Amino acid sequence: MSESAAAAPAEEAVITIADFEYQMPESIAPGAEVTVINEDDAPHTVTAKGEGEFNVEAGPGETVTFTAPEKAGEYEVICTYHPQMSGMLVIG
Amino acid sequence: MLVLRILIAVALIVSAVIHFQLAAGFQQAAPTGIGGGNIFRIQGAVAVLAALYVLVRGTRRSYLLAALVALASLAAVIAYRYVQIPTLGPIPSMYEPVWYTTKTITAVAEALALVLALIGYTLRRKSHTGPQSHVER
């Protein structure tokens, strides 16, 4: 799963979480369905910091999806369970 | 008493194995001070030593040590689940407001180890203060 995520072109919209780190695609199309693959033994969230455009939880080993915001821009992503985790999701 | 010692050792080793498994991620998640991962590794090492001690010796002291290790681990997992404890010297903030399978297994194993170790300690204490001790005197 991680190989396909690592090699995924941006339009596949896959975020992989491994070792408490987000592996983001370069960019995601507005309104695209985003797949989140959590490879860790702990749960994580993919949460937009600030205005709450998206917030999805992925349990240990789970794959979940959410819809990317329609508005283009850079969204700071955090895990609400692990404050040290952060990343940048580029929509556009 | 051997069964009790084995159960305590197994419970402590379950907790240790899970801590070792989660260590790399928690070093990343809580890197300040000595790091969350290193604290997990220390917990794992201490739990394994306590497990071996109670398994091999089965003395009151070994039960007491097992109980203390289990209590400290259980208190930490519950505290960091519900309380946003800040960084304390070299100990990073490891607040994680969620329960999940491995964490729950760890907490149950530690609680089990604590109860069984206290039972073992009490039984050993009784055997020392019972009729045999009068004979010894």
Image (cartoon, coloured by chain):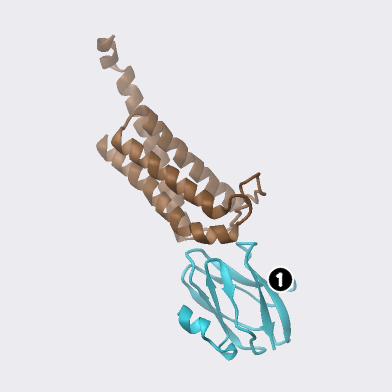
Chain colours: A cyan, B brown
Q: Which residue is mark 1?
A: A49
Is A30 rendered above or below residue B74?
A: below
Quadrant of residue B12 within the rendered picture: top left
Q: Chain of mark 1?
A: A
- Position of B104 compared to B28: left or right? left
Q: Position of residue B7 (x, y in %)?
A: 32, 43
Q: Quadrant of the C terminus of chain B?
A: top left
For label 1, the crowd category at 10 Å Cα-Cα, with few meaning under 14, some 14 to 19 and many 20 or more, is some
Q: Residue at x 58, y 73 (%)?
A: A22
Return the residue found at the far top: B137
Q: Position of residue A53 (x, y in %)?
A: 70, 77
Q: Is residue B48 above or below residue B128?
A: below
Q: Position of residue B46 (x, y in %)?
A: 44, 42
Amino acid type shown at disc 1: Lys
Residue B111 seen anywhere in this rendered image of the structure:
no
Residue B58 location in percent, x, y?
Answer: 31, 32
Classify mark 1: helix, strand or loop: loop
* Residue B17 shown left or right of residue B40 in the figure: left
* Residue in the image at 44% along x and 52% along y: B106
Work out whether residue B75 can be spotted: yes
